[in-house]
Amino acid sequence: MKVIELNVTQSDGTNKAVPIELDAKVVDLSNQSIVAVDLTELDNLEGLEKLILSGNRLMTIDLTVLAFSPAIQTVDLNSNNLRILDLEPLSYCTNLVHLNLSSNQILRVNLAPIAGCKNLEYLNLERNRLVNLDVAPISKCAKLEELNLLENPLKRLDLTALFSCASLKSLMVPKDTRLISKRKFEVELLNPPALNELIGKGRIEFSQE
């Protein structure tokens, strides 16, 4: 059996090599108290579809190798200690469907690379520390069905770009966040279902600013 090895450091200071079969489609390193991991060797897994690192103690992570993982569909980094995250490598992940960044300490994140994820259906940023967020790049994600921004200290959120997300069925935003849009709606049924729901509740302020 041919394998690669991923080098990880655990919270007790232990360094170990985790063997991964070369034909693996799923790499699951969840709940292992990992504080650091070198993902470089994943470049050798041509069929990698899922990378799961949830429930660890990562403060930073280099996702560069994912730019060379064309089959990747799921990236799950929830429940870590991430503060700043560079998503640039994901701009090459055109098959990415599921991105979970919830339950971290993310202060800011540039979503521009997400514009390249044409098949993205699920984006979870719940329970972070985001005060500002530009969701404009998400307008390119025509297949996006769910966007979760709950439990972030967002003061204001411009939803204008999301009117281009025809498949958006679920948009979860903090109740105290001021929601605005520069786009006037004319026929509600043509709007994404999630935005129609917010319009119906009178939550979106339409302006020309």
Image (cartoon, rainbow, N blue to C red):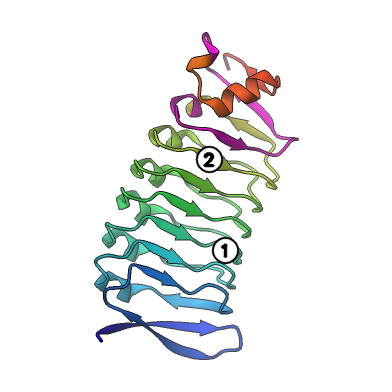
Taking the magenta stretch, the answer to whether it contains residue 187 is: yes
* On screen, residue 76 above or below 112: below
Residue holding disc 2:
146
Q: Which residue is found at the position 63% from the left and 58% from the top?
A: 103
Q: Which of 21 and 160 is in front in this view?
A: 21
Q: What residue type is labelled 1?
A: Leu
Q: Which residue is found at the position 69% from the left and 24% from the top?
A: 203
Q: What stretch is highlighted in magenta?
A: 162-188
- State the image coordinates of residue 15 (x, y, percent, origin top left): 48, 90
Could you tell me which secondary element the residue under label 1 belongs to? loop
- Asked if residue 11 lies left or right of residue 177, the reply is left
Looking at the rendering, which quadrant does residue 11 occupy? bottom right
User: Of marks 2 and 1, which one's residue comes earlier in the chain?
Assistant: 1
Residue found at the very far front of the displayed protein: 1
Taking the magenta stretch, the answer to whether it contains residue 158 is: no
Point out which mark residue 82 bears.
1
Measure the C-alpha gap from mark 2 to mark 1.
Answer: 22 Å
> Is residue 184 in view from this perspective?
no
Location of the N terminus by quadrant is bottom left
Instruction: Say few, some or many: other residues with alpha carbon within 10 Å of mark 2 (under 14 / 14 to 19 / 20 or more).
Output: some
- Asked if residue 112 lies left or right of residue 102, the reply is left
